[in-house]
Image (spheres, rainbow, N blue to C red):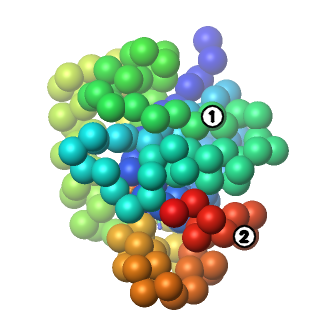
Amino acid sequence: MNKIALFPGSFDPFTIGHESIVKKAIPLFDEIIIAIGYNTSKKGFFPVENRKKMIETIFKEEPKVKVEIYSELTVEYCKKVKAQYILRGLRTATDFEYERAIAQMNRFMKSEVETIFLLTESEHTPISSTIVREIMKFKGDVSNFISKSVNAYDYL
Ligand code: ADP
């Protein structure tokens, strides 16, 4: 059976921290679905279709990686796409506490979906989509936090 991992998130925008987690996961799974959670009442900073295009460009040479948009419970979406694993990245103890609660709630709802955590590289620990968005609101340079293969401003 193919091992399929769903990497859910807002990815508003997708940073080099996210990219590094996906790259670490590539040898571990047969397929990785980067799933952009979309909430119609919370539109976000980047249009969701542009977030998808940006991530697809970053992984265009990687056949194991797919990008999708979803707006339902993550565990229900896992069932739909036959993902047995949820992939999440951990930066800090705060991330851990938040992620632990979500993973355990997901397990209550769908015990067959296992959450796998990968620890971020230390140099990626301070990088967050929130801070990248704040810098972009003031037209700052975010090129050190986003994949070299894309220009984040092209996707606004
Ligand atoms: P969410 O809105 O679900 O928190 P994010 O897009 O912020 O979605 O993050 C998706 C996942 O990526 C989460 O597991 C988060 O902890 C992880 N992540 C975010 N930034 C980094 C980073 N710099 N390094 C490693 N993992 C990260």
Which residue is drawn at the image coordinates 69% and 64% (left, top)?
150
* Total residue callouts: 2
**Given the current orientation, which residue lies at the most extreme top position?**
1
Q: Amino acid at mark 2?
A: Lys
Q: Which mark is residue 148?
A: 2
Q: Nearer the viewer, residue 57 or 86?
A: 57
**Left or right of 89 on screen, residue 58:** right
Say which residue label 1 marks.
66
The quarter in which the N terminus is drawn is top right
When the figure is inspected, residue 77 is found, relative to residue 121, above or below; the finding is: above
**Residue 117 seen by the camera:** no
Which residue is drawn at the image coordinates 29% and 58% (left, top)?
96
Q: Amino acid at mark 1?
A: Lys
Which residue is drawn at the image coordinates 18% and 34% (left, top)?
105
User: Could you say which quadrant of the image residue 80 lies in?
Assistant: top left
When the figure is inspected, residue 80 is found, relative to residue 75, above or below; the finding is: above
At mark 2, the secondary structure is loop
Residue 18 x, y percent position in the rendering: 53, 58
At mark 1, the secondary structure is strand
Q: Quadrant of ligand 1?
A: bottom left
Ligand 1 under 8 Å from disc 1 Cβ: no
Residue 106 x, y percent position in the rendering: 25, 31
**Residue 99 seen by the camera:** yes
Q: Which mark is residue 86?
A: none
User: Could you say which quadrant of the image residue 152 lies in?
Assistant: bottom right
Q: Going from the N terminus, do you reach mark 2 or mark 1 first?
A: 1
- Characterize the local packing of mark 2: few (<14), some (14-19) or many (20 or more) Cα atoms within 10 angstroms: few
**Left or right of 115 on screen, residue 82:** right
